[in-house]
Amino acid sequence: MSGAAGCRGGGGGGERGPRWRRPWKLLALGLLSASSVLAAAPGAGAMSKEEKRRLGNQVLEMFDHAYSNYMDHAYPADELMPLTCRGRVRGQEPSRGDVDDALGKFSLTLIDTLDTLVVLNKTKEFEEAVKKVIKDVNLDNDIVVSVFETNIRVLGGLLGGHSVAIMLKDKGEYMQWYNGELLHMAKELGYKLLPAFNTTSGLPYPRVNLKFGVRHPEARTGTETDTCTACAGTLILEFAALSRFTGTSIFEEYARKALDFIWEKRQRSSNLVGVTINIHTGDWVRKDSGVGAGIDSYYEYLLKAYVLLGDDSFLERFNTHYDAIMKYISQPPLLLDVHIHKPMLNARTWMDSLLAFFPGLQVLKGDIRPAIETHEMLYQVIKKHNFLPEAFTTDFRVHWAQHPLRPEFAESTYFLYKATGDPYYLEVGKTLIENLNKYARVPCGFAAMKDVRTGSHEDRMDSFFLAEMFKYLYLLFADKEDMIFDIEDYIFTTEAHLLPLWLSTTNQTISKKNTTTEYTELDDSNFDWTCPNTQILFPNDPMFAQSIREPLKNVVDKSCPRSISRAEESLGSGPKPPLRARDFMASNPEHLEILKKMGVSLIHLKDGRVQLVQHAVQAASSLDAEDGLRFMQEMIELSSQQQKEQQLPPRAVQIVSHPFFGRVVLTAGPAQFGMDLSKHKSGTRGFVATIKPYNGCSEITNPEAVKEKIALMQRGQCMFAEKARNIQKAGAIGGIVIDDNEGSSSDTAPLFQMAGDGKNTDDITIPMLFLFNKEGNIILDAIREYEAVEVLLSDKAKDRDLEMDNMDQKLPENDSHKQNSEEASSASQDVGAVSEEPEERESSDVSDPDSLSPAQADSDSVSISDQDSYIPGPGEAGTPEPACTQGDDQPQEQQTETESDSKVNWDNKVQPMESILADWNEDIEAFEMMEKDEL
């Protein structure tokens, strides 16, 4: 999600009236004033100009590394696969489900990157890229794509490219040949998206076929009934800009109608909207509400539609929603989803990473204090895990472990720096740069993190990484003289594409009837903090932002914050928190009395379990009933979690020899036997050797090649434990089993752990790990090019700079990697234990505890084990440490996609290692120089 580049008007196409310009102009002037005060403050730790310039140049080098590898190895494919150095072409790779709906065989990454090139002063590259798009891109493909993703990435990319192209042409040096070709393509794409709006409500279908639309027999779409609120509510900027640029009003009309419908269907008493809505009836399908995934950019576009279009109704709607968000969802520094009909009741106990955009939006709103608080909380999570996990719990444990290099936190960092001028946010940006280079950078670009705890990679580099991340990081460190145009003449879309503010006075064909007040009576106090002069927000105190951040410095490491219930707040019953599922003891009379007040009954079953049943009508009050429902939901999650506690977390195989230097990390499945890598922090390091026979099911015939090395073998023919015993007897120090299912990958299949053979496996003392076929082939391909390949088997990846400064083959430990693994409070998908047999394999079990509800648990009941008649709490026997303390042996969840395809052929699709390395050498030298400069 992205914010407005600036809030002041002007530029290009005329000016708006004083009523529009003044508040935004005051905000811009106020930001400058606040910046000058804070930057000049003694002891503020201001970053030198030289350091800012160095970091800005580092961002440019990183962008070049990502962009050139996309162009060299992937173009014209939609995205780069940075681990295998090839393009991702839809239909030629295993399906990733809905994630692939962004791919339309239209060179997505190039289009998404167009205006980034201009922001980074790469005008020659921009001119070449525009010519490629005009010449090569086809928008008439028979392919089903996401309306939302295609709008923000492709339509937005074409419009952003057109906006900066005409700006450059007006300057007279570049793009003199340009005649609106990108706008013509944008208009063509706009018409291809319009069939999705053929619904009675005006809400668009979530998907459309670029060639056949929705209703056509060959469209293969149009049967969906639901869409997310953000999917239908994040269209107005691009569609209105297309109408204003072309003079064709239909696009803006359709986008306005969708927004009007969502506004009308909001929950009237709470003024909140749900996550998912029926596109035909307008009924809410998912009735939880937050500011993260599924809703986020709907709120963003209401405020920005007011900025770009000057329609007061959008501002009134935004402020109405914002008041509800701050009343119900905001629990500083947390932002927790609630039920739209019962907004005092939390709908979940975790947060997703997409809400990281919200502090930036609050800056545009002018509400700085909560923006600082939430941003600082997120930064503390990042400092613990190097990246922001896709989801994390209220006590800051990992819930979903992936990180696809999302830019939302960088976006909020940029806006907070512009609002406060506090050099602290420059240091935050520096941390982001260092982490990207240290943990995500690979020879062919930047790879998404498969698991932030182990440091393993995923073979993806999404287009938004180039469209947004580098834009915000460069702008964070750039001074005005570094830019070739005034960024404040533009507004950012949610994909960080640039639309000129002068569009507000161009081709105004839409009547601005204010329909907001037809639905609600607005409280004028709602607007007190709309675009204020920030002198009010920032007293002349350079320590203002620091004073807000300071109490949150240790919130992640040293505390497990537990929110007081809304009911308790409203009743003023003192500081005692409500009963939580993790603290419940069935033998405690006080706890049983609390359950009774909440309408929860406890039944001892004959098989030793305890069954909990809630009847809301038996609760002492409606507030107690809400607490009871929350308690039941927590108990279901806790019960599900406890059933998974015997599962092992994923492991990592890291290639540490030249030329990889530890930068390639592969996700590996653990074994239930052999060395426990979580208890050996240095892991097992050695050169790899292929055994004979390759299946490892009989005595090894090449022991001299295997001795003191890590043995590679193929899955199949016998038990995993038998393979381990055979290679251990031959003198191997570890083993890697490679899946024999062609094309299998950790990207698309759930990880599993290798089980024993039903016998005592204490005799196996070496570590054993499992790699899917795709990851295993990366090692095998390296062996073909370089006979000596050294790997590290560990619980999580170690310092990526293992061999950059010396080649002594000794693994240094990095203090930043000594932190313990995170215990996951809930698993999105299970790791199934697989015991290998000659002709039969057991598939992994998959469950989703978040889909459970009391109604699914036997009429609002949940059964749990009754061992000594209580559920162990954080201070009880069996759990000696607090819940927020993570030990090395704590269970961790897996988050994986589930569709697989066995048609991938490595040899046909992967470029030879030698040709890839020819492109790497210059990158490696540049990286070494960069690190020396940093030292």
Image: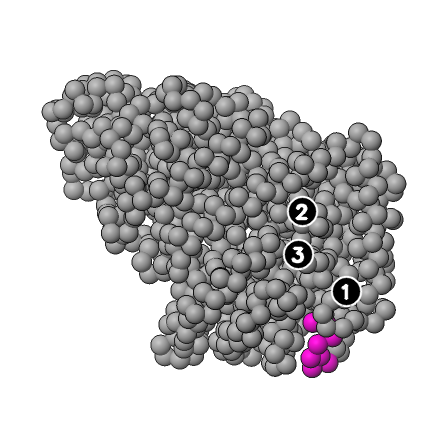
- Check contact, mark 1 vs mark 2: CB within 8 A: no
Name the chief secondary structure element in magenta: loop
Residue where numbered disc 2 is placed: 478
Mark 1 and mark 2: Cα distance apart in space: 21 Å
From the viewer's perspective, is 293 left or right of 140?
Answer: right
In front of the other: 789 or 761: 789
Question: Mark 1 vs mark 2: which is more N-terminal?
Answer: 1
**The quarter of the displayed image where residue 725 is located:** top left
Question: Amino acid under label 2?
Answer: Ala
Image position of 429 with respect to 214: above or below: above
Question: Mark 1 vs mark 3: which is more N-terminal?
Answer: 1
Q: Residue at x 82, y 31 (%)?
A: 42
In front of the other: 307 or 368: 307
Q: Give the range drawn in magenta.
A: 503-511
Mark 1 and mark 3: Cα distance apart in space: 18 Å
- Report x, y in % for residue 861: 51, 46
Of badges 1 and 2, the one in the foreground is 2
Of badges 2 and 3, the one in the foreground is 3
Q: Residue at x 44, y 45 (%)?
A: 445
Specify the label residue 9 is tagged with: 1
Image position of 562 with respect to 340: above or below: above
Q: Which residue is drawn at 83% across and 72% down?
A: 17
Question: Mark 2 vs mark 3: which is more N-terminal?
Answer: 2
Characterize the local packing of mark 3: few (<14), some (14-19) or many (20 or more) Cα atoms within 10 angstroms: some
